[in-house]
Image (cartoon, rainbow, N blue to C red):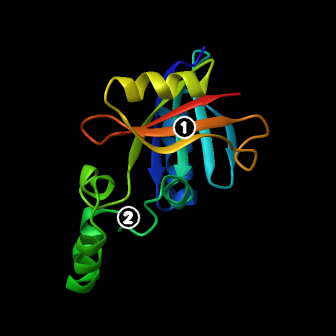
Amino acid sequence: MDALYPRLLVRDFPASAAFYQAVLRELLGVEPVKVLPGYANWDIEGQAGLALFGRDRLAAAVGTANLPQAAQDGAQDGAQDGAQDAAQGGAQDAAQGGAQDGAMLVMKVDDVDAAAACLAHHGATVVAPPQDRPDWAPTLRTAHLRDPEGNLIELQSY
């Protein structure tokens, strides 16, 4: 069972998917399990090894689409966007340094609702409550939370 694995949240999905497809094939002899628009994943010895997801899709799901995609993007956008981000404020923006997430930890669980309650009980902050995501996969249910350091966690079940 793929209980825990990294998912990189990428800006240029086609370029990132092509890069990891070539590198993982050459270095590890691993072919992708699935490559779809905005999503790709690779298994290693039958277990999830890596997944890529379009950053814009996840930013919309967890409410960070208004933030720059990376710290350097914010610096290039100029003082006007920095002032806008500061005005919007909030713990969510502060938790991630004012930029969209670049990675998240994915946990496959039996019950997303119970797992979200467990993480929240131990100090995680819910950023997207448990919900069905049929536009991502037909039977997918997810919740998104931040650990005490602000790292993004996705809980998922099928």
- Name the residue type under label 2: Gln
Can you say which quadrant of the picture contains the C terminus?
top right
Seen at 31% across and 61% down, the residue is 99
User: Distance from label 1 to label 2 (Cα)?
Assistant: 21 Å
First reached walking from the N terminus: tag 1 or tag 2: 2
Residue 5 in view, yes or no: yes
List x then y, in percent, for residue 4: 48, 22
- In the rendered image, the residue lying farthest to the right is 138
As rendered, which of 145 and 25 lies closer to the eye? 145
Seen at 70% across and 35% down, the residue is 140
Mark 1 neighbour density, 10 Å: few (under 14) some (14–19) many (20 or more)? many
As rendered, which of 121 and 29 lies closer to the eye? 121
Camera-near label (1 vs 2) is 1
Q: Is residue 146 above or below residue 29?
A: below
Q: Which residue is mark 2?
A: 69
Mark 2 neighbour density, 10 Å: few (under 14) some (14–19) many (20 or more)? many
Seen at 50% across and 62% down, the residue is 12
Quadrant in the picture for residue 38:
bottom right
Residue 30 in view, yes or no: no
Q: Which residue is mark 1?
A: 143
Answer yes or no: do the residues labelled 1 and 2 have beta carbons within 8 Å? no
List x then y, in percent, for residue 53: 55, 48
Quadrant in the picture for residue 103:
top left
The residue tagged with tag 2: helix, strand or loop? Answer: loop
Res. 110 mark: none
- Name the residue type under label 1: Ala
List x then y, in percent, for residue 68: 35, 68
Q: Is residue 9 above or below residue 108?
A: below
Seen at 27% across and 61% down, the residue is 98
Q: Is residue 133 left or right of residue 151?
A: right
The residue tagged with tag 1: helix, strand or loop? Answer: strand
Can you say which quadrant of the picture contains the N terminus?
top right
